[in-house]
Image (tube, rainbow, N blue to C red):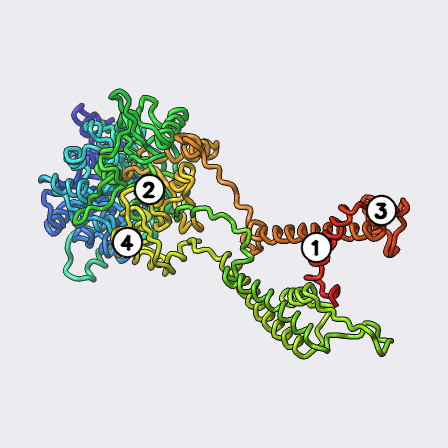
């Protein structure tokens, strides 16, 4: 038995422990971590902690601290640190590198040593450097995520704030994918060590930009935000995207004045419980540190997949060689196996899924999407997936700026029915459609928790009552738009039209009213209808000459017919030697012939003699010309009466010069004609622009008054809603033609307004419930109306038919003529009865009754020449006085009859 002293026992125990340690070391792969002064202290600490805590891991590692910054000197130090059997199979490089594979990287790739880089800049030779693995996602993928975020947020223009030219690498997808037809991106460089107040003044006060991409180091974000709040008081209208993947760890609650909406994306999360398992005290995980931990974890899994080798070939030192063949001869034999294992391995780490493509580039990862809450803390609201390039919302967060103010200032301009100022005993109150609309919108937003319930609103009047136009030589606007751009008001409500020019500098809500440009003229004075319009084709003197000619020709025809032997005929053709000859041409028959000719109705009797026929023929020719002329003139007159000189549409204005026309100066309708490419509208604009005196007005009210006072010599283009309002109050106005275009009224607000979504929702709800229709009806048809205009519908259509009011004279003539004929027939009947009374010596009454019964029996077509009387003829001898009076009456009647009918004479 061998006796061993106590000292020998301790020595033997030390030798056994050392031998076991060497044996364990020889079965684990050696790795290294490269750090320098630019790396984070937490990164090196995490590396050491993970290595220490991993007694059963497939590797053993050691940190390598470089005391220099340049690539060549670092490579020389690496040679010293990996010589004398201290080689490594993989190197985790935490240094910030440029976009190239430096000397250390090239040596590792030449010796088949896996090179795991954590820097963000991609190496241009990554596809050729097969042993390089980039754990930081490529900047083109990161910028692609931010480009998608910009589209999601619907930015129409924005600023890129950067510190150095490397930002253009990190933001290349944002720049490349921005539409060429959109407003150009505004670039401004920031000085992290200087004063940037002038830069921010230009951005906020001159360029009036509201959306910004801030690409800077995480440590500089707070200083830039402090400068921003010094320049811009209304930061609630600003939105920022912070591109630093560590930006979510910045404590922005230190700046109370910052009310902007801030968004960012990040690979890590602040509440990862595994972080404390690494004995790390910091609450927030820096990206570089998390990538180092993920690299160790991924490397561990890949090495285990290779299996624990009993004898690991000693890796070569990372030193320069004289020739390329020397690198091949010294290359680590198992390097390809480790490279393959790293490519095939998939792990989950602090930065999410870790997976590489064949070139060692990170793929299939997600970025967390966070927004700054109203308590100045970043809240995770979704994620971006590199596979789909889609941002998925996971949580709804109220806009930070929506809770930033206690009072919403609403600006408007005076103009009924939208906004009116009422002064009563020194108190100023506002009323109108816009006031009621805002009240309904605000009540809906508060009721549905769309805004803070403690929020209030107040109206004020724009000093110049202007909608707003660009100020020449500047990027500023006046009027309502200027108030919004300068952030003096949060909302502008009135009859302000949504246009592309205005929408470029402010935002608009969902339209609350649709309209179009209409033309208003004065109603023409009513014209009394001419019931004798049928006489208009011929003038009065022509009618008088025609009547005189008719009478003269009738007398001439009478004389010719009496003088001509051929018009005296045998009354009894069977008697060859008659004692008397008959002439049918009395004055009555002559006038009947001439009347029938001019009425184109003809006559049943015709002259026989050459003279009378010649006179009749000339009269027929005259009647033909007169009748044809009357018919033609009548047709022209009717057509002319249908054609009105009134303006029917805008095109009619171009074709005339007697009526002037205009619109409100520099308003949306003015811009419509100024920028229109339509031929008709361009002609209208040319006339309006050159008219002297000017046809433009300062307001719609002035234009309406000018139309009413112009006596039909001025027309005015205005929005149809304003025209409807005016027509309800002024009955002498008339809308002409159809609408020239289609446009909308909306509530204007500054770009990036926190109230836009809430107001849009409220307007849609009010529209669906019919509230908007009721509001319009109230202010257009009920309020401020002394007497409603009861405009009757015009019963006359434009079909071209003659109306009763124009032809009633014909019926009057017919009635008068018929009545005259009826009276003549009565007189004739009474005279005939009187003759019978005298001839048959019966009472007048008896003769009247018998003649009435015999003549007016509608069933009888024949009658007796001498109807029976009800009493015998009287034999009484009339008194001499009665006989004298009767004979005197008979003489007068015979004389009148002889004048008309000459048959009694001959």
Which residue, given by chain and number where applicable, does mark 3 sit on?
877
Q: Which SS class for mark 1?
A: helix
Q: Using the image, tell me which numbered label, if any, was put on residue 892.
A: 1
Dot 1 or dot 4: first in sequence order is 4
In this rendering, position of residue 587 left or right of residue 458: right
Which residue, given by chain and number where applicable, does mark 4 sit on?
176
Q: CA distance from mark 4 to mark 3?
A: 136 Å
194 vs 598: above or below: above
Q: CA distance from mark 2 to mark 4?
A: 55 Å
Dot 4 or dot 3: first in sequence order is 4
**Residue 107 locus on image (x, y percent):** 19, 54
Dot 2 or dot 4: first in sequence order is 4
Q: Which of these two is toward me, 896 or 309? A: 896
Question: Does residue 284 appear in this view?
Answer: yes
Mark in the foreground, 1 or 3: 3
Instruction: Give the residue drawn at x 61%, y 72%.
Output: 619
Question: Does residue 28 appear in this view?
Answer: no
Q: Which SS class for mark 3?
A: loop
Find out whether the residues at labels 2 and 1 contact each other: C-beta distance under 8 Å: no
Q: CA distance from mark 3 to mark 2?
A: 90 Å
Which residue, given by chain and number where applicable, does mark 2 sit on?
705
Q: Which of these two is toward me, 891 or 532? A: 891
């Amino acid at each position: 038995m061998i006796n061993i002293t106590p000292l020998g026992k301790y020595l033997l125990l030390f030798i056994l422990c050392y031998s076991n340690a060497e044996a364990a070391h020889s079965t684990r792969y050696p790795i290294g971590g490269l750090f320098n002064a630019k790396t984070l202290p937490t990164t090196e600490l995490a590396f050491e902690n993970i290595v220490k805590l991993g007694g059963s891991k497939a590797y053993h590692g050691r940190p390598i601290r470089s005391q220099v910054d340049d690539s060549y000197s670092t490579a020389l130090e690496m040679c010293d640190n990996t010589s004398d059997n201290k080689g490594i199979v993989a190197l985790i490089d935490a240094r910030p590198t440029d976009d190239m594979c430096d000397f250390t990287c090239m040596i590792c790739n030449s010796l088949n040593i896996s090179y795991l880089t954590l820097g963000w800049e991609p190496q241009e030779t990554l596809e050729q450097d097969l042993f390089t693995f980039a754990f930081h996602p490529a900047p083109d993928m990161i910028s692609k995520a931010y480009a998608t975020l910009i589209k999601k947020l619907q930015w129409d223009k924005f600023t890129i704030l950067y510190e150095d030219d490397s930002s253009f690498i990190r933001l290349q997808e944002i720049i490349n994918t921005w539409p060429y037809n959109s407003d150009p991106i505004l670039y401004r460089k920031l000085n992290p060590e200087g004063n940037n107040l002038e830069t921010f003044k230009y951005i906020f006060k001159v360029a009036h930009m509201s959306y910004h991409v801030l690409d800077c180091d995480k440590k500089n974000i707070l200083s830039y935000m402090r400068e921003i709040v010094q320049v811009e008081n209304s930061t609630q209208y600003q939105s920022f995207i912070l591109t630093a993947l560590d930006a979510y760890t910045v404590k922005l609650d230190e700046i109370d004045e910052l009310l902007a909406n801030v968004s960012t994306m990040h690979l890590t999360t602040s509440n990862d419980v595994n972080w404390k398992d690494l004995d790390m005290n910091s609450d927030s995980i820096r990206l570089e540190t998390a990538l180092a931990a993920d690299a160790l974890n991924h490397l561990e899994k890949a090495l285990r997949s290779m299996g624990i080798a009993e004898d690991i070939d000693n890796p070569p030192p990372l030193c320069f060689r004289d020739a390329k063949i020397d690198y091949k001869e010294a290359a680590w034999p198992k390097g390809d196996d480790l490279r393959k294992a790293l490519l095939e391995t998939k792990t989950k780490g602090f930065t999410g899924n870790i997976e590489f493509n064949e070139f060692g580039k990170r793929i299939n990862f997600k970025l967390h999407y966070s927004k700054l809450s109203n308590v100045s803390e970043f809240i995770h609201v979704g994620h971006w997936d590199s596979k789909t390039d889609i941002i998925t919302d996971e949580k709804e967060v109220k806009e930070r700026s929506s809770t930033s103010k206690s009072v919403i200032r609403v600006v408007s301009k005076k103009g009924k029915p939208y906004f009116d100022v009422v002064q009563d005993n020194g108190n100023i109150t506002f009323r109108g459609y816009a006031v009621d609309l805002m009240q309904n919108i605000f009540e809906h937003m508060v009721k549905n928790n769309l805004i803070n319930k403690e929020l209030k609103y107040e109206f004020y009047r724009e000093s110049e009552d202007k909608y707003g136009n660009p100020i020449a030589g500047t990027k500023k606007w006046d009027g309502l738009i200027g108030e919004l751009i300068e952030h003096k008001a949060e909302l502008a409500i009135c009859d302000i039209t949504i246009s592309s020019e205005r929408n470029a500098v402010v935002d608009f809500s969902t339209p609350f009213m649709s309209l179009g440009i209409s033309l208003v003229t004065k109603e023409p004075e009513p014209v009394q209808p001419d019931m004798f319009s049928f006489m208009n084709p011929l003038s009065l003197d022509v009618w008088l000459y025609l009547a005189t000619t008719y009478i003269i020709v009738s007398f001439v025809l009478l004389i010719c017919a009496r003088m001509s032997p051929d018009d005296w005929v045998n009354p009894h053709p069977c008697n060859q030697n008659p004692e008397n000859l008959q002439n049918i041409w009395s004055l009555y028959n002559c006038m009947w012939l001439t009347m029938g000719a001019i009425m184109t109705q003809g006559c049943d009797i015709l002259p026989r003699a050459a003279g009378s026929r010649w006179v009749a023929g000339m009269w027929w020719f005259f009647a033909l010309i007169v009748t044809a002329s009357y018919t033609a003139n009548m047709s022209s007159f009717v057509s002319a009466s249908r054609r009105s000189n009134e303006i029917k549409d805008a095109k009619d204005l171009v074709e005339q010069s007697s009526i002037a026309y205009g619109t409100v100066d520099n308003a949306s309708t003015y811009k419509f004609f100024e920028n229109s490419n339509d031929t008709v509208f361009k002609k209208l604009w040319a006339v309006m622009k050159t008219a002297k005196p000017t046809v433009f007005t300062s307001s719609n009210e002035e234009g309406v008054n000018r139309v009413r006072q112009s006596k039909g010599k001025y027309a005015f283009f205005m929005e149809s809603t304003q025209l409807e309002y005016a027509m309800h109050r002024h009955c002498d106005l008339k809308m002409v033609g159809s609408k020239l275009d289609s446009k909308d009224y909306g509530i204007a607000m500054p770009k990036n307004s926190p109230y836009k979504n809430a107001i849009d929702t409220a307007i849609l709800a009010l529209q669906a419930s019919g509230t908007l229709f009721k509001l319009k009806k109230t202010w257009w048809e009920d309020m401020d109306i002394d007497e409603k205009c009861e405009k009757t519908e015009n019963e006359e259509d434009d079909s071209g038919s003659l109306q009763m009011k124009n032809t009633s004279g014909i019926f009057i003539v017919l009635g008068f003529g018929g009545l005259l004929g009826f009276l003549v027939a009565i007189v004739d009947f009474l005279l005939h009865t009187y003759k019978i009374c005298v001839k048959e010596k019966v009472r007048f009454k008896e003769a009247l009754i018998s003649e009435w019964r015999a003549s007016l029996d509608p069933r009888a077509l024949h009658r007796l020449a001498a109807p029976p009387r009800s009493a015998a003829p009287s034999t009484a001898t009339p008194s001499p006085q009665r006989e004298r009076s009767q004979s005197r009456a008979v003489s007068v009647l015979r004389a009148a009859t002889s004048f008309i009918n000459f048959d009694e004479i001959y």
